[in-house]
């Protein structure tokens, strides 16, 4: 009953998965679980939902497809609807803050987080006949949790007489995690591998690895465009700002002008270079082969290029003062964001090589059709990467890793890979996470290169050396669920109603001991509470369920102890301080000077080292607003990089807090200096977060006869440690030596025989506060 446009039908038939329709459908009909593994671009995401639709899986219930990335959710819903000749009412998408799902929806694309939410209100997922977990190889935390849950939901649905099918779709990576995990699937599900035609891709490494990878990417794109035969270019960078930066730079270098007829360019096309010439087109630094060979090839290349330039002279002139950019922009402001490290300076053309580039750019008459691609890009702009470039122009897509496996861009012949990506990295003490640029895994590098060989042989230029590939790139990153701090993971899962986190059938399980310890900590903090197990079997332990406070705390992207601190400071308007405090506690070695620069009395003094940090950060912020940060940091012994890092973290925490508490005031700029009563509340808040890390002063009469009493001047008892712990030598609390303190962390100093344990970031507390915060 599906009537497809013949053009679509022809395009579909070229996809390797079409030949497997019957086999795929037989396996789905006969099995509850199925794994479909196939190269990126083989047609998994766009075709399998259509197979299911045509086989009647959407007649009474819906087909669900989950994606870890927003960009794919929108794009794939649109594509599948279009191929089926259905409207967005029938093939729809849903993600946080956005969607078009309605009563008539048959196929529903959604982010994995959305399906997880649905499970919380309808555990059996009764609206669906089949769930497709797409891009399972990405191993997002939500995807992994979904797989664990679905492995249990599917048998339950069978018992209820209303079967549910689960299809796991993945690139051909690490399938064993699903098939060889008997906790997840007792009998391994059948795997269907989609073989697809992949043309050879020649991989070129740079000889040197330059830190300015954006500049390198720009230069490489210029070289490809000015010297190499037709074929689209795909450039991988790490984030939205880098995408915009390169897009703008390349558009300025090779402008596309609407009212010029570029078709002439096609008739006067440059001579096509042979494959070897292409391979060697790179500058000598890129080549890892015999030097003589290279020299010979280079000569031939230069000759070919001279010929090319000759031809170019005959091409129409473009007035560079009057060019159009593809109607996009208004994005320039994004690029100029204060946080953007990629300021203009990067690509200042100075050396001789850059002169040649400038000349090449000048001589090149062919426009480059440069398009951005990243996860948060609007859907109409996303769609443009699938359309061919205008006649005469060359397609160039600048993308984040979404083009790695989620979206396949047609007609790419050259891949330029910076080798970098952004990854969430967690601080081990506060659990605050920050996005860091890191080397991609070797597996990602292979995926990226593969994008060049979809329709013809291609080339991948890695802008780093093969030594970096071998020594600095891990084979594969561990799944996110194993990288996330266990406390936050445990709390998140408890909030989803998953009570037995330790026994959960994870595709790859985090360390069980760590999960148990995390549960204990969460109970002490009052974020979990003990409930008697319903099944009164003797071997059954009590279950720990989330408390109301725990639920509030889980919204904060922090270790729960600090999330609690923030959740409790919303009411008395302490958020600006506690955000700054948590950010400052996450960054190491903020100041080197003595705390004497930050004198205090009363509660502010008793707030201790965190108080010093807080005042230093507040003052630095004011200096920053006046443009005097550098001087300020130098004067007070603050590490400028640390202060910047703290500012970034504060911004990030603030924006994540505002997602759950929209009217929260978090900016330090608006806050006055902490006063005495606020400092008292902050002391209590610090205690709520560190209530399991209390220490009490060792009294001098406790010191054994014959021991040097002076050694115990700053010594404390702490709960889980035999030996004494000490106030840090630069702790502001040495002035007070309070009876009761909490500390952020313990560490060891001194040589082996004079080893001692020292408390970092100490706050004085009042013993009468304790019973409230430390359950027995
Ligand atoms: P897989 O999921 O196996 O990686 P896809 O189903 O995403 O593969 O892609 C199959 C083909 O469909 C690719 O060649 C891709 O370029 C093409 N395609 C996907 N979306 C669009 C679109 N919006 N317009 C044109 N072609 C598209
Ligand atoms: Mg796909």
Image (tube, rainbow, N blue to C red):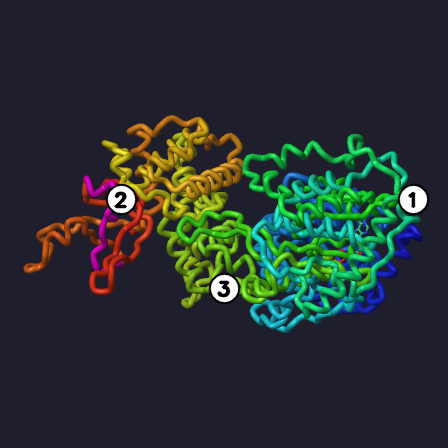
| Of labels 1 and 3, the one closer to you | 1
SS type, badge 2: helix
Q: Residues within 10 Å of mark 3 (few under 14, many from 20)?
A: few
Q: Earlier in the sequence, mark 1 or mark 3?
A: 1
Asked which quadrant contains residue 103, the reply is: top right
Q: Quadrant of the N terminus?
A: bottom right
| 726 in the magenta segment | yes
Distance Cα–Cα, label 2 vs label 1: 82 Å
Residue 579 can be seen, yes or no: yes
- Left or right placement of residue 730 versus residue 307 in this view: left
Asked which quadrant contains residue 478, the reply is: bottom right
Q: Earlier in the sequence, mark 2 or mark 1?
A: 1
* Residue at x-position 38% and y-position 54%: 521
The numbered mark at residue 503 is 3
Residue 137 can be seen, yes or no: no
Asked if disc 1 and disc 3 are in contact, CB closer than 8 Å, the reply is: no
**x, y percent for residue 4:** 90, 52
Q: Residues within 10 Å of mark 1 (few under 14, many from 20)?
A: few
- Depth check, front residue: 281 or 735: 281
Question: Ligand 2 closer than 8 Å to the CB at disc 3?
Answer: no
* Residue at x-position 78% and y-position 50%: 226
Q: Residues within 10 Å of mark 2 (few under 14, many from 20)?
A: some
> Which residue is under mark 2?
770
**x, y percent for residue 732:** 25, 41
Distance Cα–Cα, label 1 vs label 3: 67 Å
Magenta residues span: 721-735
Asked if disc 3 and disc 2 are in contact, CB closer than 8 Å, the reply is: no
- Depth check, front residue: 137 or 374: 374
- Left or right placement of residue 72 versus residue 682 in this view: right
Up the image or down, 645 lies above or below 284; here it is: above
> Which residue is under mark 1?
264
């Amino acid at each position: 009953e599906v009537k497809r446009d013949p053009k679509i039908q022809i395009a579909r038939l070229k996809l390797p998965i079409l030949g497997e329709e019957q086999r795929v459908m037989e396996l789905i009909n006969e099995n509850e679980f199925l794994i479909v593994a196939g190269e990126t671009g083989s047609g998994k995401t766009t075709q399998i939902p259509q197979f299911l639709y045509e086989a009647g899986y959407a007649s009474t219930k819906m087909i669900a497809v989950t994606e870890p990335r927003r960009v794919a959710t929108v794009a794939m819903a649109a594509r599948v609807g279009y191929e089926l000749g259905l409207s967005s009412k029938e093939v729809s998408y849903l993600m946080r803050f956005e969607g078009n799902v309605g009563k008539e929806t048959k196929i529903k694309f959604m982010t994995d987080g959305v399906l997880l939410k649905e499970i919380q209100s309808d555990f059996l997922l009764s609206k669906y006949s089949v769930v497709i977990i797409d891009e399972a190889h990405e191993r997002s935390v939500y995807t992994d949790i979904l797989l664990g849950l679905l492995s249990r939901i599917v048998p339950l649905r069978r018992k209820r007489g209303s079967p549910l099918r689960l299809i796991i779709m993945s690139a051909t990576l690490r399938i064993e995690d699903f098939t060889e995990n008997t906790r997840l699937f007792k009998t391994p599900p059948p795997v269907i591998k989609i073989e697809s035609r992949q043309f050879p891709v020649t991989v070129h490494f740079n000889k040197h690895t330059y830190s300015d990878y954006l500049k390198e990417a720009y230069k490489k794109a210029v070289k490809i465009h000015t010297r190499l035969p037709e074929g689209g270019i795909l450039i991988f960078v790490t984030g939205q700002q880098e995408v915009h930066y390169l897009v703008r730079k390349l558009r300025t270098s090779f402008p596309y002008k609407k009212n010029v007829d570029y078709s002439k360019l096609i008739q006067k096309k440059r001579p096509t270079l042979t494959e070897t010439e292409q391979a060697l087109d790179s500058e000598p630094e890129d080549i890892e082969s015999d030097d003589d060979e290279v020299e010979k090839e280079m000569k031939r290349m230069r000759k070919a290029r001279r010929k090319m330039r000759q031809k170019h002279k005959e091409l129409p002139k473009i007035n560079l003062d009057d060019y159009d950019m593809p109607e996009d922009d208004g994005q320039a402001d994004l690029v100029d964001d204060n946080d953007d490290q990629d300021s203009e300076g990067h690509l200042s053309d100075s050396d001789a090589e850059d002169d040649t580039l400038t000349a090449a750019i000048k001589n090149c008459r062919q426009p480059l059709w440069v398009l951005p691609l990243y996860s948060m890009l609007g859907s109409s702009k996303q769609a443009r990467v699938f359309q061919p470039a205008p006649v005469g122009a060359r397609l160039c897509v600048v993308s984040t890793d979404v083009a790695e496996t989620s979206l396949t861009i047609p007609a790419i012949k050259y891949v330029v890979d910076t080798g970098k990506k952004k990854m969430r990295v967690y601080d081990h003490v506060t659990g605050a996470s920050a996005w860091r640029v890191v080397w991609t895994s070797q597996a990602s590098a292979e995926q990226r290169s593969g994008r060049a060989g979809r329709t013809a042989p291609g080339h991948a230029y890695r802008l780093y050396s093969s030594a970096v590939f071998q020594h600095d790139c891990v084979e594969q990153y561990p799944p996110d669920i194993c990288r996330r701090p266990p406390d936050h993971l445990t709390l998140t899962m408890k909030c989803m109603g998953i009570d037995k986190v330790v026994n959960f059938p994870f595709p790859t399980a985090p360390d069980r001991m760590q999960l148990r310890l995390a549960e204990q900590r969460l109970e002490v903090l009052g974020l979990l509470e003990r409930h008697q197990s319903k099944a009164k079997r003797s071997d059954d332990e009590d279950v720990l369920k989330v408390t109301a406070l725990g639920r509030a705390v889980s919204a904060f992207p922090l270790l729960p102890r600090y999330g609690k601190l923030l959740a409790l400071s919303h009411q008395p308007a302490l958020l600006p301080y506690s955000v700054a405090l948590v950010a400052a506690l996450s960054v190491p070695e903020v100041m080197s000077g003595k705390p004497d620069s930050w004198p205090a009395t009363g509660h502010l003094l008793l707030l201790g080292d965190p108080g010093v940090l807080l005042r230093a950060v507040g003052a630095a912020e004011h200096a920053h607003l006046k443009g005097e940060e550098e001087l300020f940091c130098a004067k007070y012994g603050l590490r400028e990089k640390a202060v910047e890092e703290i500012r970034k973290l504060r911004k990030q925490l603030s924006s994540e807090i505002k997602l759950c508490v929209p009217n929260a005031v978090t900016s330090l700029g608006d806050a006055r200096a902490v006063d005495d009563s606020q400092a008292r509340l902050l002391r209590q808040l610090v205690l709520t977060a560190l209530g399991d890390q209390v220490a009490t002063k060792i009294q001098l009469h406790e010191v054994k006869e014959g021991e040097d009493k002076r050694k115990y001047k700053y010594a404390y008892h702490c709960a889980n440690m035999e030996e004494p712990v000490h106030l840090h030598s630069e702790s502001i609390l040495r002035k007070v030596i309070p009876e009761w303190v909490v500390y952020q962390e313990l560490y060891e100093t001194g040589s082996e025989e004079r080893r001692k344990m020292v408390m970092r970031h100490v706050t004085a507390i009042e013993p009468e506060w304790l019973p409230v915060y430390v359950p027995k």
